[in-house]
């Protein structure tokens, strides 16, 4: 009898150790959840969502939550939950290496009038920026990641963000290349990992950081075919409530017809940029649609790369920073105009190229937008 009791006790203890481990291994996924009720923390406590599995955004009553399937099902049914969307990935707009420059936007003419972006804060939401590049001046940055090189916004193993940054603001220092706005304050906001991928949560955190740190122009050379209501509301808040100019790559999914513009460029609060070559002809891969707003050089663009080097790339990723750079010049000249007023000036002064679905208002022109000859 004594042996039986000991055996039972051992089995019971073994069971006590097995059950918690099984619970700890329960699979969780990340979701963006917007609440429309006041008792959010109580609701999350009720459904046993640990505090370490929650991230509260500063705006929109929006959370990033790590949820089990059971917790997800409970939240989706709750009347105080406005929406739940699965965390998905966006990708850098694909680029291929070939030679180019930035002359078509005529930024050099702006320099002679003193317009070089001085004092304007521009965030590059991308794979980071190599802050040690001798042709770049990076004054700040942020990464939502917590481990490895992904956690450091000033390291760019991918190269994409460094290339984009050079087109916007490479220094006018007699080496390498010069950017559209060579004296702008560059901020490295890493929302894409070394493999060029980043989630909706990562991008939303990057936008939030930009809002909180007084960024005036955001460039997002990234895109996704998937819609995110959370990202939509974040860019709307940044643009309509904070007056931040947001420029994004239209995408490289074009075939000459139909609507293929990526998110977030597709949103009204974001300026969608199409890709043209040195002869102002649409590059065949450039996405098309009625949300294309403006065009810029994106074919064989020569710019900065990690390790103090330079290379050429092609894509709407390379077109977008030309437009962002022009908006930096515009904000320097017009610190008190609204974002919409600046947008009207840039669009109204663009050089007509043809079909709206291909080119939008046309080729961005810095001197015309600034009102100089």
Image (cartoon, rainbow, N blue to C red):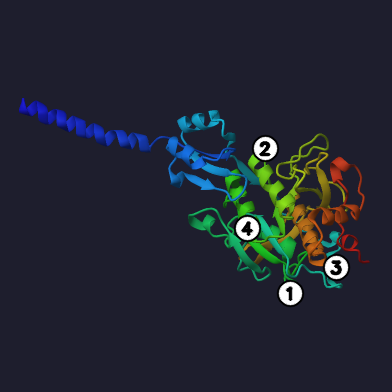
Task: Give the image location of residue 102, x and y in percent.
Answer: 81, 61
Residue 227 circle label: 2
Image quadrant in which you'd find residue 329: bottom right
Lower position in the chain sequence, tag 3 or tag 2: 3
Task: Give the image location of residue 351, x and y in percent.
Answer: 91, 53
Q: Nearer the viewer, mark 1 or mark 2?
A: 2
Disc 3 packing (10 Å; few <14; some 14–19; many ≥20): many
Q: Is residue 115 left or right of residue 241?
A: right
Asked if residue 271 can be seen in this view, the reply is yes
Q: For this rendering, which residue is in front, 97 or 344? A: 344
Query: How far separated are the C-alphas under marks 4 and 1?
Result: 31 Å
Task: Give the image location of residue 240, x and y in percent.
Answer: 74, 50
Query: How far separated are the C-alphas under marks 3 and 1?
Result: 16 Å
Disc 2 packing (10 Å; few <14; some 14–19; many ≥20): some
Image quadrant in which you'd find residue 14: top left
Q: Provide the residue designation for mark 4.
A: 212
Q: Provide the residue designation for mark 1.
A: 173
Label 4: state its secondary structure. Answer: helix
Q: Split into 4 quadrants, where in the image is the C terminus? A: bottom right
Image quadrant in which you'd find residue 121: bottom right
- Residues marked 1 and 2 touching at CB (< 8 Å): no
Residue 110 circle label: 3
Lower position in the chain sequence, tag 4 or tag 2: 4
């Amino acid at each position: 009898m004594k042996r039986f009791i000991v055996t039972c006790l051992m089995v019971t203890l073994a069971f006590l150790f097995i059950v918690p481990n099984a619970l700890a291994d329960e699979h969780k996924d990340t979701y963006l959840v917007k609440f429309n009720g006041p008792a959010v923390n109580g609701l999350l406590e009720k459904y046993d969502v640990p505090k370490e599995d929650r991230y509260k955004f500063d705006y929109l009553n929006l959370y990033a939550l790590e949820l089990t399937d059971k917790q997800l099902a409970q939240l989706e049914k709750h009347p105080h939950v406005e929406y739940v969307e699965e965390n998905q990935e966006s990708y850098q707009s694909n680029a291929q290496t070939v030679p180019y420059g930035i002359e078509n936007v005529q930024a050099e003419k702006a320099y002679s009038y003193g317009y070089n972006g001085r004092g304007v804060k521009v965030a590059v939401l991308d794979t980071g920026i190599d802050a040690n590049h001798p042709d770049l001046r990076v004054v700040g940055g942020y990464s939502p990641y917590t481990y490895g090189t992904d956690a450091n916004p000033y390291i760019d193993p991918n190269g994409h963000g460094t290339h984009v940054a050079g087109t916007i603001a490479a220094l006018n220092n007699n080496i390498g290349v010069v950017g559209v706005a060579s004296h702008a304050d560059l901020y490295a906001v890493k929302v894409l990992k070394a493999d060029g991928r980043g989630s909706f949560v990562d991008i939303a955190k990057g936008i939030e950081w930009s809002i909180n740190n007084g960024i005036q122009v955001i460039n997002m050379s990234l895109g996704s075919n998937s819609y995110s209501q959370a990202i939509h509301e974040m860019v709307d808040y940044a643009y309509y409530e904070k007056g931040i100019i947001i420029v994004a790559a239209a995408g490289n999914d074009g075939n000459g017809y139909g609507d293929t513009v990526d998110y977030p460029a597709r949103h009204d609060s974001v300026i969608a940029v199409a890709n043209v070559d040195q002869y102002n002809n649409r590059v065949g891969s450039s996405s098309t649609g009625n949300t294309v707003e403006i065009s810029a050089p994106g074919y064989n663009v020569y710019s900065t790369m990690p390790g103090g080097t330079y290379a050429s790339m092609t894509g709407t990723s390379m077109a977008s920073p030309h437009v962002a750079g022009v908006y930096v010049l515009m904000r320097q000249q017009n610190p008190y105009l609204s974002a919409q007023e600046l947008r009207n000036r840039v669009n109204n002064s663009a050089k007509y190229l043809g079909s709206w679905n291909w080119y939008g208002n046309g080729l961005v022109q810095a001197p015309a937008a600034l009102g100089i000859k």
